[in-house]
Image (cartoon, rainbow, N blue to C red):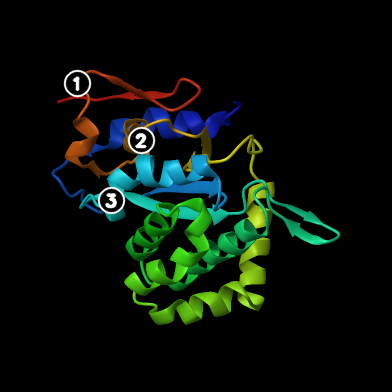
Amino acid sequence: MALGVALLLVGASAYAAGTRGGAVAAAAAPPVEVTLYAEALCPYCAAFVTDTLGPLVGEPWFDAVVKFRYVAWGNAVNTSRGVMCQHGPAECRLNRVLNCAEALLPTQAAFLRFALCLEGAPAKRMEEAVDECATKEGMPAAARLHTCAGGVSGDMLERAAAAETAALQPPHEYVPWVTVQGIALGAPESTADLLRYVCVAFAGERPEACYAPPPGAALALPGGAAGRVTA
């Protein structure tokens, strides 16, 4: 992937500027922007949310270090008959639910708990799980969520997700598609991979989780820019 000068700036300078911290990182630096471009009924997207991202979400440092966004559009297309989603009309509805949930829930942590709950449900009953998952996050009967997803707000969020996905450079090749600080990573294959990219990009006091690899292990973003873990 052609990643440009931004890659060098993030990889080479950010890691050098950071310091080692405790279990909870100090909020002295802006959080790392991690954006997931995905679609609701994609099994690989669900696996990324539950298996790759999920283990990091409950960490005490996560909200201070990571600014996470879920852009639910994926491989959907606009046609003369309306939006067509890769996995059918149910996926279109669930994409709108996810976009609305991110807009309506008051905190990143609440949205991530909702997304983990929803993506953890079997695909065939994911629509049934919406109310259950929303209620857990303080949205009784999911009324506001359904109103958003079925109305003008849902339309606006859907268009915004489509436009943001279409504007990706380089364009997404598959889903899930992940960017860190706007740099395309594709789909990190493990929690450790995602954590390493975040640690490289974070310029503040890093949590101990960043130093789990053996001292001296190289950490690199795609394209060759790298930092190094030191004790």
Quadrant position of residue 173:
top right
Closer to the chain start, of discs 2 and 3, is: 2
Residue where numbered disc 1 is placed:
214
Quadrant of image for the N terminus? top right
Residue nearest the observer in this picture, 208 or 50: 50
Closer to the chain start, of discs 2 and 1, is: 2
Residue 104 located left or right of residue 204? right
Q: Is residue 117 above or below residue 171?
A: below
- Residue plotted at (62% across, 48% down): 74
Residue 225 located left or right of residue 28? right
Q: Is residue 154 visible?
A: yes
Q: Amino acid at mark 2?
A: Ala
Quadrant position of residue 189:
top left
Q: Amino acid at mark 1?
A: Pro
- Of circles 2 and 3, the one toward us is 3
Residue where numbered disc 3 is placed:
62
